[in-house]
């Protein structure tokens, strides 16, 4: 079971609008149930259970593999996107010559995600509202159908 990636438990900050929007998208696309979502800001969350500190998990996204190993940063996103059938989108981030650039770029984003979220909040709120409205329209007469797109 070494390095078996799924189910993959994603540790993210639900209070970060950019992060929450991304997790909403992954959750909606996770038809196979390969991802588990854990908000690190939830009451009672204890990062030490996973061999990390809350500050480490807050600094960048982390994930737990079934074998108990933690992964972090862009590798988490690569695994999560692959889980929902979008691995091709982030595949270039793992290519040897590009990987250090994407890893560094992610670290810059993670460091400034709260500022980025504040600036992007109006756009994010509209996107989330549109998604909720679309999902509500998919339900008629008490019956909800799954759409092919989130």
Image: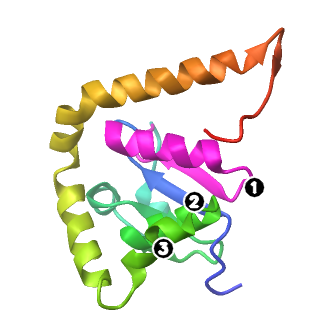
Tell me the quadrant of the picture where the N terminus can be found: bottom right
At a point 45% along the width and 69% down the height, the residue shown is 90
Taking the spot 23% from the left edge, 78% from the top edge, the residue there is 101
- Is 15 situated left or right of 4 in this image? left
Percent x, y of residue 72 = 40, 70
Circles 2, 3 touching at the beta carbon (< 8 Å): no
Residue 114 image point, x, y percent: 20, 42
Q: Is residue 51 magenta?
A: no
Question: Front-most of 46 and 138?
Answer: 138
Q: Nearer the viewer, residue 142 or 49?
A: 142
Real-space Cα distance between discs 1 and 3? 22 Å
Eyeballing the image, is 73 above or below 114? below
| Distance from Cα at disc 2 to Cα at disc 3 | 9 Å
Of tags 1 and 3, the one toward the viewer is 1
The question of residue 28 being in magenta is answered with: yes
**What's drawn in magenta, residue-wise?**
16-42
Q: Residue at x 63, y 48 (%)?
A: 29
Image-based side of 67 in relation to 21, left or right: right
* Circle nearer the viewer, 1 or 2: 1
Q: Secondary structure at mark 3?
A: strand
Expressed as whole percent of the image width and height from the top left, the position of residue 140 reads 79, 12
Q: Which mark is residue 32?
A: 1
Which residue is under mark 3? 70
37 with respect to 91 (left or right): right
SS at badge 1: loop
User: What residue does disc 2 label?
Assistant: 9
Of residue 3 and residue 140, the one placed in the foreground of this image is 140
**Is the C terminus in the top left, top right, bottom left or bottom right quadrant?**
top right
Q: Is residue 99 above or below residue 83?
A: below
Rounded to the nearest angstrom, the CA distance separating label 1 from label 2 is: 14 Å
Kindly indicate the quadrant of the structure image that contains residue 71.
bottom left
């Amino acid at each position: 079971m070494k390095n078996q990636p799924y189910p993959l438990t994603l540790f993210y900050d639900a209070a970060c609008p950019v992060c929450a929007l991304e997790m909403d998208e992954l959750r909606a696309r996770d038809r196979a149930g390969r991802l588990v979502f854990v908000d690190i800001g939830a009451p009672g969350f204890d990062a030490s259970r996973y061999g990390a500190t809350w500050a480490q998990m807050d600094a960048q996204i982390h994930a737990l593999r079934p074998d108990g190993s933690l992964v972090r940063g862009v590798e988490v996103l690569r695994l999560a996107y692959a889980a929902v059938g979008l691995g091709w989108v982030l595949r270039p981030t793992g290519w040897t010559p590009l990987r250090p650039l994407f890893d560094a770029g992610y670290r810059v984003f993670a460091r400034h995600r709260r500022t980025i979220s504040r600036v992007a909040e109006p756009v994010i709120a509209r996107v989330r509202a549109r998604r909720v409205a679309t999902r509500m329209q998919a339900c008629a007469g008490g019956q909800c159908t799954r759409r092919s797109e989130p």
